[in-house]
Image (cartoon, rainbow, N blue to C red):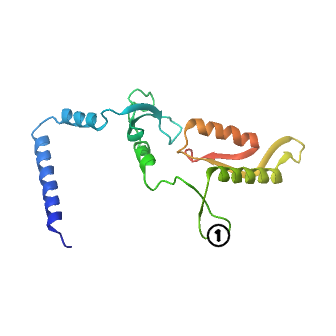
Amino acid sequence: MEISRRDFLRFSVAAGSATALGGLIGSGVNLGPVVARAQELRIKGAQVTPSVCPYCSVGCGTLIHTIDGKIVNIEGDLRSPHNEGTLCPKGAATYQLHINPNRPTKVLHRAPGATDWEEWDLERAMDRVAELVKKTRDETFIERATSGKLVNMTPAIFSLGGATLDIEWNHIQQKLMRGLGIVAIENQARI
């Protein structure tokens, strides 16, 4: 492994800083005020919006800090009776969910048998999903069981809710799926 002078200097500065910090902590210096001040400066001037963690059905409270409409920090809400300011690892990574440059932001469609994806506008994609759901439901709808009991269901569609969906969306999704007669309904957060 070859180390350049620049890398050597970086490693030296990092090692010296770590040694100095360790020495301060070891000698009993209270770094609490410094950490609190650094935290305050990091979100100074940010607008705080209370929200809910999107990952599971617990509904942990979060505080979203934004500056000029851009999310700069997401943390647990101390006022929440569910989590009292703490977040699980998934909840603590919510910030990455929003700012990740690899996050898909466009509708991609790959036709049956095709090898390439094509971009669709959202309206076209939603129309196609609605068309396929209606077609499948119409073709497989069962009004009455063989015993004559009214069932109004379709066994051909499965609904899987996601843990990144909030509680309200999952409730609406349940209502919609049951209204369509779908009986195979599950949520990834429970699995």
Q: Residue furthest bottom?
A: 1
In the image, 132: left or right of 60? right
Residue at (17, 36) in percent of width and height: 31
In the image, 119: left or right of 53? right
Residue situated in front as seen by the camera: 105 or 19: 105
Q: Quadrant of residue 176?
A: top right
Quarter occupied by the N terminus: bottom left
Give the image location of residue 79, x and y in percent. Answer: 40, 26
How many numbered marks appear? 1
Q: Secondary structure at mark 1?
A: loop
Give the image location of residue 14, x and y in percent. Answer: 16, 54
Identity of the amino acid at label 1?
Ala
Badge 1, how many Cα within 10 Å: few under 14, some, many 20+?
few
Residue at (63, 46) in percent of width and height: 186
Give the image location of residue 43, x and y in percent. Answer: 31, 36
In the image, 167: left or right of 34? right
Residue at (82, 42) in percent of width and height: 151
Give the image location of residue 167, x and y in percent. Answer: 56, 36
Residue at (76, 43) in percent of width and height: 181
Q: Which residue is label 1 attached to?
A: 114
Residue situated in front as seen by the camera: 48 or 28: 48
